[in-house]
Image (cartoon, rainbow, N blue to C red):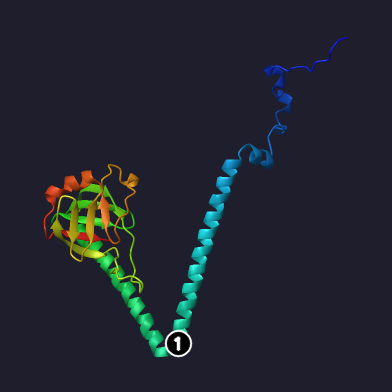
Amino acid sequence: MEIFRPRQESGLETRRRPERAGEGDRRRGSWRDFRRAYPSFVFVLGLGLIAMVAVDAWLIAKRVTYNHDVKVLREHMTDAERERTDAIVQSEQNKLQIAIELAKRQAKFDKKLHLNVSVDSARMYLTREGALLREMPVQFGPERVPAESSSAPPAALPRGERTVADISDTRITLDGGTQILTSSSANLANDSTPVPPGALRIRKEDMDAIMPNLSAGMKVYFY
């Protein structure tokens, strides 16, 4: 008796013929097949999506809460108090903008050696009379707002003009208490050590390079 055996097609026979090139690939699996083949990856992907949605929902809820609190506070104000509050807020915003623009202008035309800190681009520059001598990446610490439950003072990134008050091998202290610290890692992005609130951190090689040029009273412009 002859036993029937299914024909084993060779690699050349299983290739799609030229006249059938326009047809879809029926071997392509569905989402169900992919989920069964890679359950761990799908699970992690799902957790990531849930986390992003949860963070977005939390931010939206906080914004709604803040807007509601502001609305309630304004409702309890008189017309004169609301006008005065709006004027104060506008004045403070104008002051900050003027301070930033003034710092940019002074940094550009300052004939003495000074440091410029661009908060938006996270860069610090050693310059003199508009000439760039060294560019350095910077890490910023978080800003700390005053809270009733904490005795820690508020800490914010400065804006405008500051002055070097004290210098050591590992830090530069500015007037007002802001500190420029040294990272222990050669690559600043790999340094996972938290930066103190209101402080800055630069690479050790950058600190060593600019240290001979630093002196008390040197200007530092934040913008």
**In which quadrant will I find the N terminus?**
top right
In the depicted structure, whether residue 184 falls above or below residue 180: above
> Furthest residue to the right?
1
Q: Identify the residue shown where x is 20% and y is 66%.
A: 176
x, y percent for residue 18: 70, 24
- Residue with the mark numbered 1: 76
In the depicted structure, whether residue 24 falls above or below residue 68: above
In the depicted structure, whether residue 221 falls above or below residue 18: below
In the depicted structure, whether residue 186 falls above or below residue 219: above
Q: Identify the residue shown where x is 21% and y is 64%.
A: 177
> Furthest residue to the top?
1
x, y percent for residue 53: 55, 57
Q: How many marks?
A: 1
| Local crowd size for mark 1, using a 10 Å CA cut-off: few (<14), some (14–19), many (≥20) | few
Q: Identify the residue shown where x is 44% and y is 82%.
A: 73
Q: Nearer the viewer, residue 141 or 114?
A: 141
Asked whether, in this view, residue 121 is left or right of residue 103, the answer is right
Asked whether, in this view, residue 31 is left or right of residue 73, the answer is right
Task: Kindly state the secondary structure of the residue where label 1 is placed.
Answer: loop
Q: Nearer the viewer, residue 207 or 183?
A: 183
Q: Identify the residue shown where x is 71% and y is 34%.
A: 24
Say which quarter of the image contains residue 95. bottom left
**In which quadrant will I find the C terminus?**
bottom left
x, y percent for residue 23: 73, 32
Q: Nearer the viewer, residue 25 or 194?
A: 194
What amino acid is found at the position of numbered circle 1 in the picture?
His
x, y percent for residue 185: 28, 44
Say which quarter of the image contains residue 101. bottom left
